[in-house]
Image (cartoon, grey):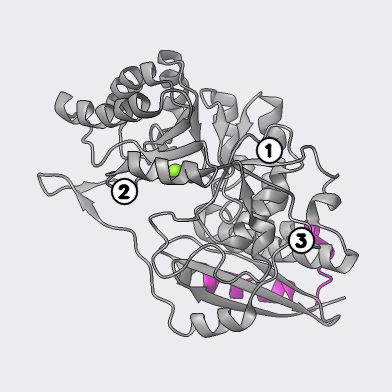
Amino acid sequence: MKITKLTTYRLAPRWMFLKIETDAGITGWGEPVIEGKARSVEAAVHEFEPYLIGQDPSRINDLWQVMYRGGFYRGGAILMSAIAGIDQALWDIKGKALGVPVYELLGGLVRDKMKMYSWVGGDRPADVIADIKRLREGGFDTFKMNGSEEMGLIDSAAKVDAAVGRIAEIRAAFGFDIEFGIDFHGRIGAPMAKVMLRELEPYRPLFVEEPVLAEQDETYARLAAHTSIPLAAGERMYSRFEFKRVFQGGGLSIVQPDLSHAGGITECMKIAGMAEAYDVALAPHCPLGPIALAACLQVDFVSHNAVLQEQSMGIHYNKGGELLDYVLNKDDFHIEGGYILPLPKPGLGVEVDEARVIEASKTAPDWRNPLWRHADGSVAEW
Ligand SMILES: [Mg+2]
C-alpha cells in the first residue's frame, strides 16, 4: 500500500480535517489544527507531502520520525499539530486495513468505558447553575469551567472574591453531587495563582488547570506545595520533550496533551506512559472535532492512568458547527451516565460525512480567539 494524496478541509467552527488516500482505496482521516492558525497548519501539512507520497502508510513509527527529525527544525504548535493530524490519519488507515479499532492495535482495552466531562459557562461565565442543571439531565456529573476573566499580575481582592464567589455558589447549589475542574486558562500569573488556589481550596475542585502558563512550568512544583488541589496542564505542550520537564520538575497531578497538537496518537501514547511512571493522571485536551476526540479515546482506552476525557459538545467555541455535524455514525458517540463506550468501528471509529465536509469547507470561516485587554489598555491573556 502506498500513500497517494493528502487533502485538507478547513471547517466551521474552527477545525481542519485531513484526508489521506492510498492506492489500495483505503482512506484515513485526521484533524491537524491549531485553533486560530488553521492556515499555518494546513501549509505545514502540505510541506510534509514529499516525505509521505509514495510511502507505505503502515510504517507509522518511521514516518513520524521522518516528519519530526527529517527537517532539522522541529517542535512547536504548528509543526507538531501537522504531524498529529497526519499521524491520526495513518492510524485510521492501519486500523481500517486490518479491520480493527486502533485500540486493538495498541494492546487492547484497559477499561470498559471512559469518563467524560462537559464544559459549562463560557469565557465570561454566567448562568452556570442553570447550565449545570440542564447538563445533569443529560447524565453529566463532571464539569469544567473557566476560573476567572482577565486578572492582572497583581489584582484586587474584589476580583478574587468575584471568581471564588461563583464557585461557592455552585457548591452551595449542588453540594458534592457534582465534580468540577477549574480552568485558569493561563489568565492568572503566579502571584495571583497562589492566592486563588488558597481561596478555592475549601470548595475542593477536582483540579485547577493551567494555574499558570506553560512558559512558567517551573512554577508548578512551588504552587503544588501550597495547595492540596491537584494541578493540571499540558494543552500548550507539544512533545514528550516538553512534558519531560514537568515530570522532572514535579507539581502536576494531571497532564493534558492534545491529540491534535502533541504529535498525535504515536507521541501521546509515549507521554501517557511517561506520566504513568510518575503517578500522574492523563486527561487529554479536546475542545476540537470528532476525529480528534476519537484519537483521544484510542489512547484513553489503553492507558491505565487516563481519568477524564474532555469533549466539545455544546462548548462555547462551537459557533457554526457541532461535534457530530460531520459524523455519520453519531450513535457510537453516545454518552450515557457521563461515560462513553469504545468506538466499535475499525480505525479511529469515525465515519466522516465527506460530502458535508466538502460543502462546508467552501465557506469555512477563519476563527480567531478574542483579544482581551486590561482596564489600562495592556494586553490580557485570554
Ligand atoms: Mg484549558
Residues tagged 1 and 2 counted as in contact (Cβ below 8 A):
no
Q: Secondary structure at mark 2?
A: loop
- Which residue position holds label 3? 91
Q: Secondary structure at mark 1?
A: helix
Disc 1 CB within 8 Å of nearest ligand 1 atom = no
Q: Which residues are magenta?
A: 42-63
Q: Is residue 54 magenta?
A: yes
Disc 3 CB within 8 Å of nearest ligand 1 atom = no
Q: Is residue 192 left or right of residue 302?
A: left
Residue furthest to the left in view is 376
Give the label on residue 123, or none.
2
Secondary structure mostly taken by the magenta-highlighted segment of the chain: helix
Identity, as a three-letter code, of the amino acid under mark 2: Asp
Residue located at (47% from left, 28% from top): 207
Disc nearer the start of the sequence (1/3): 3
Above or below for 207 versus 237: above
Percent position of residue 225, x then y? 45, 14
Q: In which quadrant of the rendered image does the N terminus lie?
A: bottom right
Q: Is residue 269 magenta?
A: no
Q: Is residue 51 left or right of residue 227?
A: right
Q: Which quadrant holds residue 125?
A: top left
Disc nearer the start of the sequence (3/2): 3
Distance from disc 3 to disc 2, alpha carbons, whole Å, reads 34 Å
Residue located at (22% from left, 27% from top): 160
Give the label on residue 272, or none.
1
Disc nearer the start of the sequence (1/2): 2
Residue located at (42% from left, 16% from top): 227
Asked if residue 60 can be seen in this view, the reply is yes
Distance from disc 1 to disc 2, alpha carbons, whole Å, reads 29 Å
- The one nearer the camera, 201 or 370, is 201
